Image (tube, grey):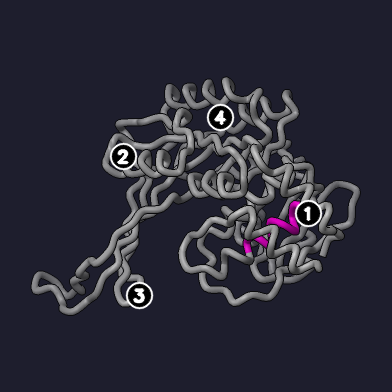
C-alpha cells in the first residue's frame, strides 16, 4: 500500500471537487429489460420474456463522465450520438444528471451506440447491440476537435476513452494529444486494440492485461511477463506512466528510471466487474488532477475499482463513499 495519511486523504478529497475533465470517446447507452419466462414462443424455440421493468444507464465514455461527476468533478463529454430514440434517451439522462451536452454531435447517419440486455429470472438471456464501428466522417471530427479546442483552456484533465466504435480516429487522437502537450494538460487513456499505438506521449496509458497482451503479441501470465510488457509499452508509447491493470492482482505501475511498483487489490467479494475499468480511469484522473502522485492516484483508483466490483451492474463510485472507505482502511 502507498503511504497516505488522513490529512493527505482529506486534502485530495477537497482538491477533487470542481475539477473539469473532458471525456472524449465512444458514448454508449446501456438498456436493460427485466422480466420472467413462462413459456416458449410458438413461432420459434425461444423463450418469451414478459418484461416487468426497463431502465437505462450511461455506458462507455458516458459512464466515465458520470463517474467524474460522482467523484466531485465537472465532466465535459465529447462524442457522437445518433438522431434516434436511443439518442433522445441518452440526452434525457444527461439532463437529469445535469451534465452538459454541448460537446455531443448528432450524426444522422450513425445510430446511438446502445447495448440492450434482456434478463429473466436473473439470467442473461440475450444482448442486442446497435452500433456503427466505422470512423466518424471528417466533418464530424472537425466539429468535435473545434469544440474540444474551445474548452481546452478550462480543462484540468482529459480522458481518451476508446472502445473502437469509431469516434477516436488516429488524426483526432494525434491532434488532442498535441494540444494537451502544448498546454501541459493532464491526459489519460483507456485504450483498445485498433488505435493502441497512436496513444503516444500521454500522461498515463491504462491498458488491462488482455489489451496489453493482444497488442504485444504475448501472453501475460507471470510476474516476469508483467514486467516485460509494462516496460515495452513504456518505451513504445513514450508515456510518462503505464498502468497495467491485472484484475484481482491489482495494478502494476511503470515509469522511466524507476522500479516497477505493484499495488495489490484488497480482497473483496466480486459480484460484477462491469464498469470497473471506467471507475479506475475516472478515479485515477480526478486524483491526479487534485495533486496526487501516481502511486496515491493508483491506490485510490484500485480501491474504487474494488468497491464497484461488489455491486451488481454498472454503478459509479461516490466521492464520500470512496474516501470514507479508504479512511477506515488506513485508521
* Comparing labels 4 and 1, the label whose residue is closer to the camera: 1
Q: CA distance from mark 3 to mark 2?
A: 28 Å
Residue 165 appears at what percent x and percent y? 45, 44
* Comparing labels 2 and 4, the label whose residue is closer to the camera: 2
**Relative to residue 105, is residue 261 depicted above or below?**
below
- Sequence-wise, the earlier of marks 4 and 3 is 3
- Sequence-wise, the earlier of marks 2 and 4 is 2
Q: CA distance from mark 4 to mark 1?
A: 36 Å
- Sequence-wise, the earlier of marks 1 and 3 is 1
Find disc 2 in the rendering and name its residue: 88
* Comparing labels 3 and 2, the label whose residue is closer to the camera: 2
Q: Quadrant of residue 321?
A: bottom right
**Relative to residue 100, is residue 125 depicted above or below?**
below
Q: CA distance from mark 2 to mark 4?
A: 26 Å
Q: Which residue: 33% across, 49% down?
A: 130
Find disc 1 in the rendering and name its residue: 9
- Circle 4: is it few (<14), some (14-19), or many (20+) Cα within 10 Å? some
In this view, the residue in front, 276 or 18, is: 18
Find disc 4 in the rendering and name its residue: 172
* Comparing labels 4 and 3, the label whose residue is closer to the camera: 3
Element type at mark 1: helix
Q: Which residues are magenta?
A: 297-305
In this view, the residue in front, 111 or 268, is: 268
* Comparing labels 1 and 3, the label whose residue is closer to the camera: 1
- Sequence-wise, the earlier of marks 3 and 2 is 2
Apparent side of residue 260 relative to residue 90 in the rendered image (left or right):
right
- Residue 300, magenta (yes or no): yes
Find disc 3 in the rendering and name its residue: 123
| CB atoms of marks 1 and 3 within 8 Å | no
Looking at the image, which residue sits at the far bottom? 38
Examine the residues drawn in magenta and state their main secondary structure.
helix
Amino acid at each position: 500500500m502507498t503511504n497516505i495519511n488522513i490529512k493527505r486523504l482529506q486534502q485530495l478529497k477537497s482538491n477533487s471537487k470542481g475539477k473539469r475533465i473532458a471525456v472524449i470517446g465512444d458514448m454508449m447507452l446501456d438498456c436493460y429489460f427485466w422480466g420472467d419466462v413462462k413459456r416458449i414462443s410458438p413461432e420459434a424455440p425461444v423463450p418469451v420474456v414478459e418484461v416487468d421493468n426497463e431502465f437505462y444507464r450511461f455506458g462507455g465514455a458516458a459512464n466515465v463522465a458520470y463517474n467524474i461527476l460522482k467523484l466531485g468533478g465537472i465532466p465535459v463529454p465529447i462524442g457522437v450520438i445518433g438522431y434516434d430514440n436511443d439518442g433522445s434517451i441518452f440526452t434525457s439522462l444527461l439532463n437529469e444528471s445535469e451534465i452538459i451536452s454541448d460537446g455531443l454531435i448528432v450524426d444522422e447517419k450513425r445510430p446511438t451506440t446502445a447495448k440492450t440486455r434482456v434478463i429473466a429470472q436473473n439470467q442473461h438471456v440475450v444482448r442486442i447491440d446497435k452500433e456503427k464501428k466505422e470512423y466518424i466522417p471528417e466533418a464530424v471530427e472537425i466539429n468535435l476537435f473545434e469544440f474540444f479546442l474551445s474548452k481546452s483552456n478550462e480543462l484540468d484533465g482529459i480522458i481518451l476513452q476508446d472502445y473502437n466504435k469509431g469516434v477516436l480516429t488516429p488524426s483526432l487522437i494525434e491532434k488532442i494529444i498535441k494540444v494537451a502537450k502544448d498546454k501541459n494538460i493532464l491526459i489519460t487513456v483507456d485504450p483498445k486494440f485498433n488505435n493502441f499505438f497512436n496513444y503516444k506521449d500521454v500522461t498515463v496509458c491504462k491498458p488491462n492485461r488482455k489489451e496489453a497482451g493482444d497488442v504485444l503479441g504475448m501472453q501475460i501470465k507471470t510476474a516476469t511477463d508483467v514486467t516485460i510488457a509494462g516496460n515495452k509499452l513504456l518505451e513504445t508509447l513514450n508515456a510518462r506512466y503505464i498502468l497495467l491493470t491485472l484484475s484481482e492482482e491489482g495494478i502494476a505501475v511503470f515509469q522511466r528510471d524507476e522500479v516497477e511498483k505493484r499495488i495489490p487489490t484488497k480482497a473483496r467479494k466480486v459480484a460484477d466487474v462491469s464498469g470497473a475499468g471506467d471507475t479506475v480511469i475516472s478515479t485515477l484522473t480526478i486524483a491526479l488532477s487534485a495533486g496526487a502522485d501516481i502511486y496515491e492516484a493508483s491506490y485510490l483508483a484500485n480501491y474504487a475499482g474494488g468497491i464497484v466490483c461488489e455491486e451488481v451492474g454498472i454503478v459509479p463510485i461516490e466521492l464520500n463513499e470512496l474516501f470514507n472507505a479508504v479512511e477506515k482502511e488506513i485508521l
